[in-house]
Image (spheres, helix red, strand yellow):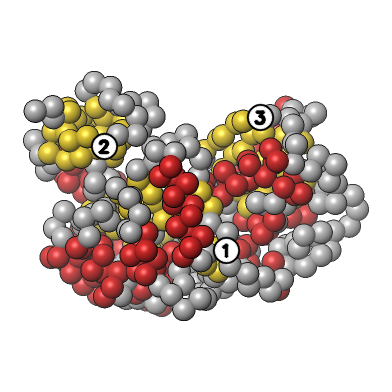
Amino acid sequence: MSVTVADGVEVVNFGCRLNIAEGEAVRAAAVEAGARDTMIFNSCAVTDEAVRQARQAVRRALRERPGADVVVTGCAAELEAARFADMGARVVRNDAKGLAQSYDPGTVSLRRQGPISGGRNMGPTGDGPLASQGNRSPYTPALSGADHARAFLGVQTGCSHSCTFCATVMARGTARSATVDAVADAARTALDRGQREIILTGVDLASYGDDSSTTLAALVEALLTLPIVRLRLSSLDPNRIDDALFALLTQEGRVMPHVHLALQAGDDMVLTRMKRRHRRADAVALVARLKAARPEIAIGADLIAGFPTEDDSMFANSLALIDDCDIVFGHIFPYSARAGTAAARMPQVGRAVARDRAATLREANMRRRHAWLDGQVGCTATMLIERDGVSGHAENFAALTLSAPAAAGTIIPVRIGARIDDRLTAMEITA
């Protein structure tokens, strides 16, 4: 969760990096509209727990700040619009959350004033599902604020796949991409304000350009004509890393050696029931190719524990994937059913089992990460300094803490010292 406060508007972002990037557009739109004493919750719906947290935060805000204008947008607001409206909040749909008129203090059309038709996936006035709105206009790039040394740049939204556990299509519609020119303009804005690292993000980043006859590799190549010092890519579908993108990940020095893969599971039967488009052997082979071409690449992955029908042997295959794919940055969470998805109708393993398996995965991932970090002690790296002057990340995304403050936003050479939990100490190399 991230929070930004400016000009009487507080934006609370839940969930993914794309939401963080879009949160700045939300804040700017609300300020433009003249909103004051306004709390905007930019919600997430990737799990039931994410929706519960959003409901809890909105309920607390309505109780503790009765005079404030409380607004809910984001994916949970799409899926549970009527519930948030019944609580007394205003609801703004995903496609309208970057528009100033959505936050006009006089707007009441999305607040609960009587029956709202289509409680799930409300249209702009609560009268229809997002997925049926047919908005095929290009996505407007979302650029995070200037409060971090790194800039998150959202380049696409939605997803055109049908994974059985995911409610993204209901919440954001099918995939739409920003134009290359629009993304480049947003990147120039980040560079002009001194942000030397840009992270490209999206709901299904690897599908960028599918709706406009271009590709993610072509976008990266276009951005590298700009004076970007560091470029990172967020989560990638492993079956969409084509030869051009593979070459950029392994041969282009300004593309950071850090690849995060949307693996979700390490068992073929589970992957089939998830309707994923790769198999276990594909993931293992891809990581082996990446490591052979660029040994310093650090691997991250999304993993779901306790998917419906997952038995002990299936889970064991997912657990073994942490070592087989050398996963050092695991985004691991227990499965929770999302209403309206196919997986919610499958035989469930139970929340307690899912939580226990997630904990086991996290422990295994922590051991792998700590061994990887220990192997870097004594090595040199470059470090992007965050706004506090002492924290930052190496090229491979290892978290570093500097021994003495340096100028925020700079990239400096460092020597790695000791590991302390999940971070490495670092000392600037001055000679």
Marks 1/3: CA–CA distance: 27 Å
Tags 1 and 2 in contact by the CB under 8 Å rule?
no
In percent of width and height, residue 156 lies at 51, 63
* Drawn side of residue 261 relative to residue 20, left or right: left
* Drawn side of residue 40 relative to residue 325, left or right: right
Q: Earlier in the sequence, mark 1 or mark 3?
A: 3
Q: Amino acid at mark 3?
A: Asp
Relative to 383, residue 123 above or below: below
Residue indicated by mark 1: 139
Looking at this view, is 395 or 318 the one in front? 395
Residue indicated by mark 2: 411
Give the total number of marks visible in the rendering: 3
Relative to 292, residue 2 above or below: above
Looking at this view, is 74 or 318 the one in front? 74
Q: Residue at x 89, y 57 (%)?
A: 115
Tags 1 and 3 in contact by the CB under 8 Å rule?
no
* Farthest residue, direction top: 404
Q: Earlier in the sequence, mark 2 or mark 3?
A: 3
In percent of width and height, residue 381 lies at 17, 40
Q: Residue at x 77, y 60 (%)?
A: 124
Label 3: state its secondary structure: loop
Looking at this view, is 2 or 189 the one in front? 189
Q: Residues within 10 Å of mark 3 (few under 14, many from 20)?
A: some
